[in-house]
Image (cartoon, grey):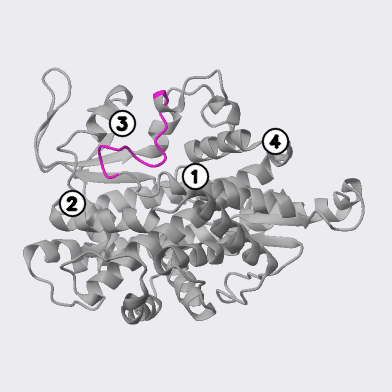
Amino acid sequence: MLTAVWVAVAVVVISLPRWLPARVVALRGWVFTRINGEESIAVPGDLVGVDRFREVYSHPAASGRSEGAVLSDLFWYWLSPGPEMHQEHLEAGERYDAVALATRRILSLPRARVEELTRGCVGRALEGRHGVRHGVRHGVRHGVRHGVVRLRDLIMPAWAEFSYELVFGEPCPPHARELIVGNADDVVTALKCCGLRHMDRRDRLTAYLVESLPRVRHELPAGLTAREQALYLQGAFFNTAVVQMSEATAHVLMALARHPDVQARARAGDDRYLDQVIAETLRLYPLFGIAHRVTTGDIRVGEGVVIPAGSVLCFDYPAFHRAGFPDPERFDPRRFAPGHAPARELNHIPFGMPANRPCPAWRLAPLALRVAVREVLRAYELDSTAAHTRSLPNRGPCLLTPHDAGGPAGVRRGPGRRLTLLSMRLKDGWEDVWRSLVQLVLGTYMVWDARRLRLCERHFSGDARPQGT
């Protein structure tokens, strides 16, 4: 009897990586809903189907961003201080228009310059000229010629340099790169509930940007204080841009690492095929999970259905991107090949929609992303057995093998490689057990603390007194 009990316990323990993380994710979603309130309308959902997703998303009344949404308190908590100056969180009006114009000016680079800048930044990241370290927790070794790395950590310094040169028009000094990477990593780690915000990292970057404002190469939005201008730059270029480009690159490289046949064709093929790979990656792993908007007026949906003003619409990108595709969970770049339906006719909006706060880098980002991926493929073969999920909390574990490593491909893919990949799978599975528990605890705390502080609500009510953030 005792033996049977121990066997049962062993079976349960061994099977934890298979079932516990998914159960904890579901529990975390339930906790978030209970704490955050049930104020939102899911789109697509019971009220708004997939067929009306674009119609509602692009409706002029679906333009409110922060005011009146309990969800906003949580996003402001993650982005504080200064989310009221973040372009994505500003309400429509003169200030938003001025900030959006400044962003478009900064992003206006010729294609050749974007490609040149990307190649230089990614090349330095791969060659390890930074000496940047995120700390023992990440285990990042820049300049590694082979071995297992975390793709997001490896590539983030490149996008830090890229954003710096966009803003300042000059090479990024090491001290600035460390500040940018430290802040961006802190933001995305908190967003994934894998760690708490470290406000000292945020504040050091803000102070650096305030001092550096005279060197910005474009005119900044008028009517803002120096601190507000710094917070605008920090939010748009050194939070969102660095985080999203790092995530996008890691997703594409992980997809290639887990699909060797696609990787081989992408390495040997032209950019059109690589564009298909990127489009399919952003379909299956969209950078945005939920985009919430607050209705500024009534929206009529079909016959007899009206979404009243003040409603919170939660646009579910993953659900929309899977609707209408055969076998939607399968990674298949051919969905975007010539001869298929044009991308504009598919349920595919990785950069949002023009009528409702589209990503301001919707032209620049795909071009830069393609060059970055191409540079990595030129230098390395990629392999990964780690889990690849939309949120990518594991930061993309991947085995890099340089093309100039000694011996033919058969040798490079021998027993040592197989053992490394087996170890990666086991390690990632057990890390996921611990990581999911951390996400449950920290995520619950941060949602509760955001509701307690009410940063967004107090801003719009005029009560902006500090409350211990």
Q: Earlier in the sequence, mark 3 or mark 2?
A: 3
The alpha-carbon separation of the residues under discs 3 and 2 comes to 19 Å
Residue labelled with disc 2: 69
Q: Amino acid at mark 3?
A: Pro
The alpha-carbon separation of the residues under discs 3 and 4 comes to 36 Å
Tell me the residue at 46%/76% (across/down): 179
Q: Report the magenta residues as a range.
A: 345-357
- Numbered label attached to residue 269: 4
Q: Nearer the viewer, mark 2 or mark 4?
A: 4
- Numbered label attached to residue 366: 1
Question: Is 78 situated left or right of 410 in this image?
Answer: left
Q: Earlier in the sequence, mark 3 or mark 4?
A: 3
**Residue 271 location in percent, x, y?**
62, 38
Inspect this view and state whether residue 457 appears.
yes
The alpha-carbon separation of the residues under discs 2 and 4 comes to 46 Å
Q: Is residue 268 above or below residue 414?
A: above
**Label 4 environment density (alpha carbons within 10 Å; few <14, some 14–19, many ≥20):** few
On whether residue 353 falls in the magenta region, the answer is: yes
**Residue 151 location in percent, x, y?**
61, 58
Q: Is residue 362 above or below residue 73?
A: above
Q: Nearer the viewer, mark 3 or mark 1?
A: 1
The alpha-carbon separation of the residues under discs 1 and 2 comes to 31 Å
Q: Nearer the viewer, mark 3 or mark 4?
A: 4
On whether residue 284 falls in the magenta region, the answer is: no
Q: Nearer the viewer, mark 1 or mark 2?
A: 1
